[in-house]
Each structure stands twice: as C-alpha cells, then as structure tokens.
Amino acid sequence: MSLRALHDLPAPAKLNLFLHVTGRRADGYHLLQSLFVLIDWADQIHLERRADGRLLRHDIGPGLPADDLCLKAARALQHASGCQWGADIHLDKRVPWGAGLGGGSSDAATVLLGLNRLWGLNWPRQRLLALGLTLGADVPFFLGGRNAIVEGIGEILHPVDLQPLHFHVVKPPASAETAKIFSHPLVTRNTSPAIVEGLLQSIALGGVAGPAGTAINKWHVMWGRNDLQCATEALCPEVKIAAKTLDRLHGNARMSGSGSAVFSAVPESVASKQVAVSNSGLWPDGWVECWCRSLTRHPLEAWST
C-alpha cells in the first residue's frame, strides 16, 4: 500500500433550512423532517497512517474533549473492518461546537471517508452510512454527499438540488444542551410531516423573488420553521437576541439544528458587502460570525459509491 497520508480533507458544516419534530419513537428518539444544506464553512482534517494500530488525535487550534467523534469514528471503522492500521488525526477546528451546524458529525464523516481510502478498505457508501448512524444522527447526511431532506432520526435521505444560496451566520458563546432542548415543554412534537414529493417539487420550481425583489427562492427562506427554536431561546436568551438582530438586518432569521447558531439567507449583493457589516461592531465580543455559501455536493462525495 503506497498511500501514507491524506491532507486538507474538508469537513463542511450544514444548516437546517427548516426542522420539524414530527413525533417520537417508542425508544424515546424524536422523529424529524428537515432540509439539510451543506455550506462552505468547514473544518480541515489531515490523516497519517500508523503501522502500530494506534488512533491518536492532534488538535490544531482549540483543544477538544479527549474522546470526540473523530476518534469514535476511527475506532468504529477499525473494529468493524478488522483493519490493523492506525492513524494520526490532525484536526483544524474552525466550525464552532454547540452551534447546530453539525461540525462534530461532519468531522466523523470525513474521518470515515478518509480512512476508508487511507486503509484501502473500499467500503461502499451504504456500509459507511450504517456505521455512521451508530455514531450520530447527522453523520449519515455528511456521508451521503448531497443536500437532502432528512427524515426519521437522520437515516432517511432524499437528495435535492438547490439553487446557490448565501447565508449570514452568527453564533453567540452560550449554547444549550440538546437533551434539555428536546425535553423542554416549548418544543412542538407533533408537526404534521410534509409530503416529500411535494417538498421536492416546490424546491425544484424555485426562482421566486425574495424581499425587495432580491433573487432568493421564497420557498427556501419562508417555508417551515425550527420547532426547537422557542425552547432554545428560553434556555439561551442570546439565541433570541441573535435571531432578532439578523431578522432586522435581513429578515427570515432562523436557528440551525439544536445549537445556538442563527442564520439568514441573503442575496449575493448583500453577501458581497460583508466586510462593511462585519466590521460594524454589531456583535459582542466572543460571538462568531460567518458569511458563507451553500455547496451543491460534499467535496468528498466521489470518495464512496
């Protein structure tokens, strides 16, 4: 085997353009329906093959918990495949955790895709998807490689093609625990699931003018809601402040996932002026801001078939 290392592997974040809680399974897991969109805000991962079978993570930048999803993913793949190789995992963490942007799940997916190649396993996508679901509900989406309507607990993927979108994303320092959010009385747990075929058709039509005649697809920015947002705002008031501020700037502000990041879809003309807004002192110290674009495919989508 000649491949010894893989460098600069992207682990892109995601946004939930809507997130509906449609019920709960007998085992307590909530059933969801959501539109997941990949964005170009990404962590970077470097993998180096080890002959001694050890799995080690090296943090570039902020330190992470000792046993994060990267190591869990590598360990799960090593165990399931019986592979004797190990790996040094160098993680350049750029997407904030606790944001609802799927950063940890995306890191895990990139590690699975990378080690699948580095170790010469050649597992097909479906086999990786099954393993990914044991690690976290968002991991299968990142392994799927496409923007998608996601259902169930994250394992049912309906790929979609979206027109390019630009976003203004803000994350306050505080965040709320996912378990506390889902158990909060303000969470709507019985939103009627939309018919997937109808959603796909609405997305495919596209092209409806947004606010002030801007070329934003109205369906993308106006349809649905995040059923977890009211509960999160009650637990973390900074989320409400972020949402109100972005709504005043752009309209259509919405929380992503079960984290504290809030985003608005914006026209390209607004995104191009981001420097002026970013330097306006609008956000308190410690808040993280990013202007980003949607991706049509995961950069490593072709690494598994």
Image: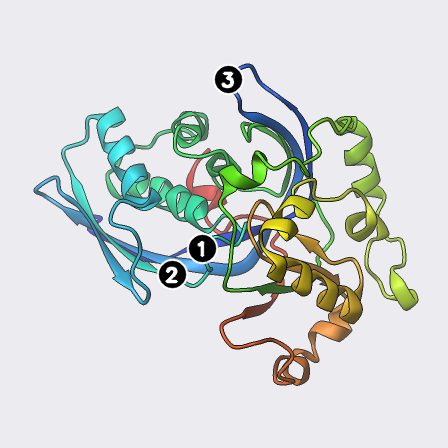
Residue 277, label in figure: none
Asked whether, in this view, residue 186 is left or right of residue 125, the answer is right
Q: Label 2 is placed on what type of residue?
A: Lys
Q: Counting other residues with Cα less than 10 Å from the Cα at mark 1, is it few (<14), some (14-19), or many (20 or more)?
A: some
Using the image, determine if residue 195 lies above or below residue 90: above
Residue 93, label in figure: 2
Name which quarter of the figure residue 83 lies in.
top left
Separation (CA) of disc 2 from disc 1: 9 Å
Q: Which residue is mark 1?
A: 97
Q: Are marks 2 and 1 in contact (CB under 8 Å)?
A: yes
> In this rendering, which labeled residue sits more in front, label 1 or label 3?
3
Q: Secondary structure at mark 1?
A: loop
Q: Counting other residues with Cα less than 10 Å from the Cα at mark 2, is it few (<14), some (14-19), or many (20 or more)?
A: many
Q: Secondary structure at mark 2?
A: loop
Q: Label 3 is placed on what type of residue?
A: Asp
Residue 161 pos. (x, y %): 70, 44
Name which quarter of the figure residue 265 lies in.
bottom right
The residue lying furthest to the top in this view is 26
Residue 65 pos. (x, y %): 29, 51
Residue 81 pos. (x, y %): 25, 26
Separation (CA) of disc 1 from disc 3: 27 Å
Residue 27, label in figure: 3
- Which of these two is toward me, 279 or 91? 279
Query: Quarter holding the N terminus?
Result: top left
Using the image, determine if residue 4 lies above or below residue 34: below
